[in-house]
Image (cartoon, rainbow, N blue to C red):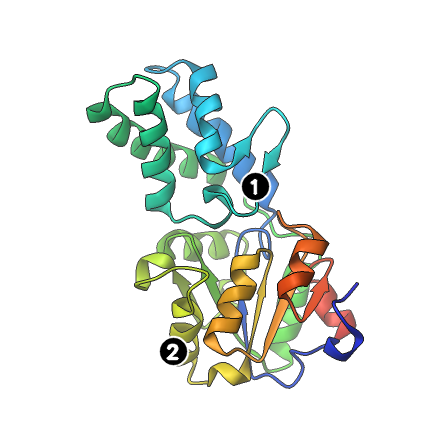
């Protein structure tokens, strides 16, 4: 599966590989749908569970159908956007605006702890082995994610992947998040490479657009997250089933 035979293994001549985290390294649905359920449970003491679940449409989530919109806040939003959008939706439903912000923030913190304790942060099949092999081949590796930097680093440690990544960057470390180029440009600066020497690997159109706007050499779309192959192919140089296929194709 690729977006054009001329694009096959377009990352091969690159010096650096910049990976998105959720849906690219981490099993997105296992972690984040469970995380959403934990948020609902944490808020159920002060809010009706059905109301909170309905309000998750602010994140582009339909738990009943297990659907996540690829351009919704859960897929590409920052922590602040997640917190603010859910708090705002609950306020629109008649809940106290003074309470919703702090309550949602605490529920989100609870949910992060819960998914860690329940071992729900797991790599996509074959991706951990691929990352280890790409590192062995001499690529400089970085993570560029809409999540907070500290949380992203903690997730990599839980999966025992942190030794492979020289740089871990979240949106709390840049002025503009995806699809702006800031994360990719800062990762390249910290790695000491030019953007034209780097490839971006991600599961959303925002990842591919970030690669383009940063002047990256290659945009690798992976269909292991929330975006369809067809939607990724519009923006990507190549589309793979997952990052695990980079070893076979490269």
| Camera-nearest residue between 153 and 213 | 213
Spatial CA distance of label 2 from label 1 is 32 Å
Q: Residue 100's x, y, as percent?
A: 28, 26
Number of numbered discs overlaid on the protein picture: 2
Q: In this view of the protein, can residue 119 be seen by the observer? A: no
Q: Residue 222's x, y, as percent?
A: 66, 59
Q: Residue at x 32, y 15 (%)?
A: 46
Query: Which residue was labeled with disc 1?
Result: 69
Label ID, residue 134 = none
Residue 181: name its quadrant: bottom left
Q: Are marks 2 and 1 in contact (CB under 8 Å)?
A: no
Query: Which residue was labeled with disc 2?
Result: 190
Q: Residue 31's x, y, as percent?
A: 55, 40
Query: What is the quadrant of the N terminus in the image?
Result: bottom right
Q: Secondary structure at mark 2?
A: helix
In the image, which is nearer the foreground, mark 2 or mark 1?
1
Q: Residue 22's x, y, as percent?
A: 54, 51
Q: Residue at x 49, y 57 (%)?
A: 156
Q: Is residue 41 above or below residue 104?
A: above
Q: Residues within 10 Å of mark 1 (few under 14, many from 20)?
A: some
Residue 33: name its quadrant: top right
Residue 89: name its quadrant: top left
Q: Is residue 126 left or right of residue 209?
A: right
Q: Farthest left residue?
A: 98
């Amino acid at each position: 599966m690729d977006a054009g035979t001329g694009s096959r293994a377009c990352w091969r001549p690159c010096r650096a590989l910049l990976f998105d985290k959720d849906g690219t390294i981490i099993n997105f649905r296992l972690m984040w749908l469970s995380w959403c359920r934990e948020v609902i449970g944490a808020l159920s003491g002060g809010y009706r569970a059905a109301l909170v679940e309905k309000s998750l449409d602010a994140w582009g989530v339909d738990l009943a159908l297990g659907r996540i919109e690829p351009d919704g806040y859960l897929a590409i939003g920052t922590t602040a956007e997640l917190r603010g959008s859910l708090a705002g939706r609950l306020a629109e439903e008649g809940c106290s605006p003074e309470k919703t912000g702090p309550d949602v923030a605490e529920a989100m913190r609870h949910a992060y702890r819960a998914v860690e304790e329940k071992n729900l942060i797991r790599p996509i099949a074959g991706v951990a082995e691929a990352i280890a092999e790409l590192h062995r081949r001499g690529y400089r590796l970085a993570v560029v994610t809409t999540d907070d930097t500290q949380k992203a680093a903690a997730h990599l440690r839980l999966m025992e992947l942190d030794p492979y990544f020289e740089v871990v960057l979240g949106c709390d470390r840049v002025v503009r998040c995806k699809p702006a180029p800031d994360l990719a440009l800062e990762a390249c600066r910290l790695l000491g490479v030019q953007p034209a020497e780097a490839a971006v690997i991600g599961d959303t159109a925002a990842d591919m657009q970030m690669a383009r706007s940063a002047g990256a050499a290659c945009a690798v779309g992976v269909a292991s997250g929330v975006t369809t192959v067809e939607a990724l192919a519009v923006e990507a140089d190549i589309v793979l089933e997952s990052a695990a296929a980079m070893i076979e194709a490269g």
